[in-house]
Amino acid sequence: MKFCRMLSGASSTSATTTTTIDSPGHLSILQESSGALQVVGELPNAARPQPLGKSGEQLYASRFIGARGYLVTYRLTDPLYVLDLSSPADPKLAGELQVDGYSDYLFPLNENLLLGVGKDAISDGSAGDGRFAWYQGVKVSLMDVSDPAHPIETARQIIGRRGTDATVLRDHHGIALQYLGNTVRVGLPVSLHDTFPQWGIVGAPSDYYAFTRTELQRLEVNLAAQSLKSLPAIASTVPGERDIMNDRALLWNDQVHWYQNGNWASTGW
C-alpha cells in the first residue's frame, strides 16, 4: 500500500518534493532533479532507525497538512503518528497517540483538530479478525494535534455494534461536513447492526450483531470545546438491508438531503 503527497516549497530551495509512504512503515521524500526524482530524505534512516509503526501493524489512513503528515496504523490499538516534514532532508516522527480501534478516514477540521472515522476494537486474547482484536461498531473520534509531540483524543462516539458499516469507510465521498462558526455538522450514512445475535454469547467481542436499519447519523463538533455531540439519527426511507456504498449526504443551510438507492429524502437538520 502506498500513500503519496506533493509538497510545494517544503525545502530550502522551494523545489517541489513528493512524499511517499509504503506499508509497512517506510517514508521517502523525493525531489525533482534534471527531470528525475531523487530521494532527499527518508524514514527510518541511520540517524532515526525507529520504523513507522510496530511489527504487524498495517497502514490504514494518511493525511498531509502543510509541513506535517498524519498516519494511522492498526493491529490491536489505533496509533496516530504525527510526522514533522518541515525539513525534507530530515523528516522525523514528532509524536504518537495510542487509542483502541482504528481509523480508515482522517479529515482536518482545522489546523489543530482531526476527525477520524473507523471501527472500535476489543481484544479477547485471540487473533480476532486477524488484527489481534475484534472490530466493533463505527468509531468517530476527535484528535487534538496542536502539540505534535503529544496528540490526544478529545472525544469519541461509537455507533452500533459489530457489523455496523459506514459509507465513508469505503468511499471518502460518503461523509458530509458543514461549517457554521465554531460548529461542524457531520452527516454519515450508516448500516446499523445493533440487534442481539441469535447465536453466540451475548456480549462477547466476536459476536456479529444482526442488521437493525439504515440511517443517516448526525453529529456536531464544537471546535472551541473540541467536543462531539450525537443527534437523533434519520431513518432510511428505503426498507430492508442494502449496500450503502453509493449513499450520499448533502447539508445546506438547515436542511439535510440524503441520496439513498436512487432516491432523495430531505428534512431539517
Image: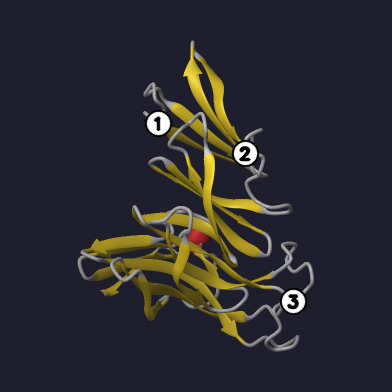
* Image position of 201 with respect to 21: above or below: below
Measure how far apart labels 1 and 2 are at the Cα level: 20 Å
The Cα–Cα distance between marks 3 and 2, rounded to whole angstroms, is 34 Å
Quadrant location, the C terminus: bottom left
Rate crowding at label 3 as few (under 14), some (14 to 19) or many (20 or more) other CA atoms within 10 Å.
few
Please give the name of the residue rendered at 71% of the width and 83% of the height, measured from the top-left corner: 204
Disc number for residue 48:
2
- Determine the secondary structure under disc 1: loop
Disc 1 marks a residue whose amino acid type is Ala
Disc 3 designates what residue? 124
Q: Residue at x 24, y 66 (%)?
A: 182
- Marked residue nearer the N-terminal end (1 or 3): 1
Closer mark to the observer between disc 1 and disc 2: 2
What SS does tag 2 mark?
loop
- Check disc 2: other Cα within 10 Å, few if <14, some if 14-19, many if 20+: few
Judge by depth and name the residue closer to the eye, 128 or 160: 128
Q: Three-letter amino acid code at disc 2?
A: Arg
Residue at the spot of label 1? 10
Q: Nearer the viewer, residue 201 or 33?
A: 33
**Residue type at the position of mark 3:** Asp
The image shows residue 169 at horizontal and vertical percentages of 52, 60
Element at badge 3?
Answer: loop
Q: Is residue 44 above or below residue 206?
A: above
- 220 relative position to 252: left or right: right
Rounded to the nearest angstrom, the CA distance separating label 1 from label 3 is: 45 Å
Q: Earlier in the sequence, mark 1 or mark 2?
A: 1
Outermost residue, front direction? 47
Q: Earlier in the sequence, mark 3 or mark 2?
A: 2
Q: Position of residue 135 (x, y in %)?
A: 64, 70
